[in-house]
Amino acid sequence: MILSAKESALFLIEKAQRRRADGEAYIVEYKTREATIENNEIQNTIQASGVGVAFRVSYNGKMGLAYASGLDRDNLYQLFEDAFLSTKYAVKNDFNAFAEPPKTVPIVDIYDSSLDEGTIRSTIEHMLSINRIFPSCNPIRGFDLLHYTEKGKKVFLANTKGLYVSYPTSDISFWGILRGKNKENEQSYSIFHKCKFFPNEAEVTNIAKDYAHKLSSLLMTTKEIKNGEYTTIFSPQVTNKFLYSLLLSLRADIVIKRGTFLSGRLNEKVASNIVDVVDDGTKNKFYGTLPVDDEGIPAKSKTLIKNGVLKGFLHTISTARQTKTEPTGNAKRYNLNKFPSVGATNFFIATKDTGVNDLIASTVKGVYLCDSMGHGFDIATGNFSLPARGVLVERGEIIHSVNVFINTKIESILKNIEGISDVLGYPSWTDVISPTIKVRGLFLSHIR
């Protein structure tokens, strides 16, 4: 007998109550459509749908977890027994707990209802539209590879405390490898974009223009620069790498287990006065926005660094109980077969009132970094390294392309930020959204 998602959640909760245990059911119904184009030829299309359910049960202070696909009553019965049995082998943890029913839940706009009428044909048309618009922005010549995904899902979350919430959400994303070319040079550039709603033609054009601008800079002749200190402007794509490292350092679970360079430093100055670092799960139509986190704690906005001063960390229920503070609505399930851990919603440096062009124009001698090629980070010391591509800037003018290497500390970057742009860039894979930032006195080494 197949149950509905709500019936399944209540079935599992009732079984937990009969065993005098606490329990939590997390169910996801999803539909996804994908398409890939390579060198202007459609390579494959995929359609999939399904349902997954994770059940956590707490008994005598021990937490167990099991997961399954499908909502057959017999499968759900076995799922509960598997979760309950796993408590026998778990370590007792007094910090485990489930969320109380929230008094209020933020109303957020996170679902594109046009997904409901969509077909694989409309998915292909959306992908072909992106493939058509990007080459209209010089010097982009086209995509070597483009992968496009549309996903709609509905989440159901219930527990023995009386919590029950459900909500739909949509995820639209595309990634690919652009090819740019001018008379002298040719260059590839990896891109990634994700959003909650289908981008219209004007929005896709603006995304394409942004990448075209960066490709134009990278297609300039590359020359060596002297090793030394430069005012360095990080594009959003490069800021993402730095900001993701900062995000890891602000996760309370990592702080508790391993320690980070920010451990034990609440209310200390860790950045310049103009820096506010925020995690906000309530921003309408932003990719990381949800009404509640994956434990049922309502989404909220948290300022973690205010005017350069460290004010807090990101928490789940468990980490908040360990540190005697409040959960921040940052529990995330990266897989149904894993316990929730700390994650970002929309994590960013708050924008200021300076345009990107003004940040460049006011630079006497510096480097504007357009793209990065991986990065290294030591979470305990804050050491940060990054090979990057960009352009030399002198008296506000772009001179030539450069390849450089950064080896510094996250805190050094934070404390030397002297400019922040007025717009956020596009979200990264990691729910980090970055403005353009300007950092004084950063030591750069030339690399070939």
Image (tube, grey):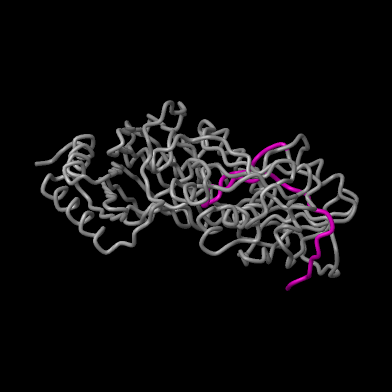
- The residue sitting at the left extreme is 1
Residue 9: % across, % down: 23, 39
The residue segment tinted magenta is 422-448
- The residue sitting at the bottom extreme is 448
Return the residue nearer the eye: 288 or 316. 316
**Relative horizontal placement of residue 376, taking residue 285 as reference (left or right):** right
Magenta-colored segment: predominant secondary structure: strand
Q: Can residue 214 be seen in this view?
A: yes
Instruction: Name the residue rendered at 67%, 44% in the picture.
Output: 305
Quadrant including the C terminus? bottom right
Quadrant including the N terminus? top left
**Relative horizontal placement of residue 147, taking residue 323 as reference (left or right):** left
Residue 123: % across, % down: 38, 41
Instruction: Name the residue rendered at 17%, 43% in the picture.
Output: 15
Return the residue nearer the eye: 446 or 68. 68
Q: In this view, does 99 lie above or below 284?
A: below
Return the residue nearer the eye: 108 or 89. 89
Q: Quadrant of the rendered structure where residue 277 is? A: top right
Queried whether the magenta region covers residue 433, the answer comes back as: yes
Q: In this view, does 224 lie above or below 414?
A: below
Counting labels gives 0
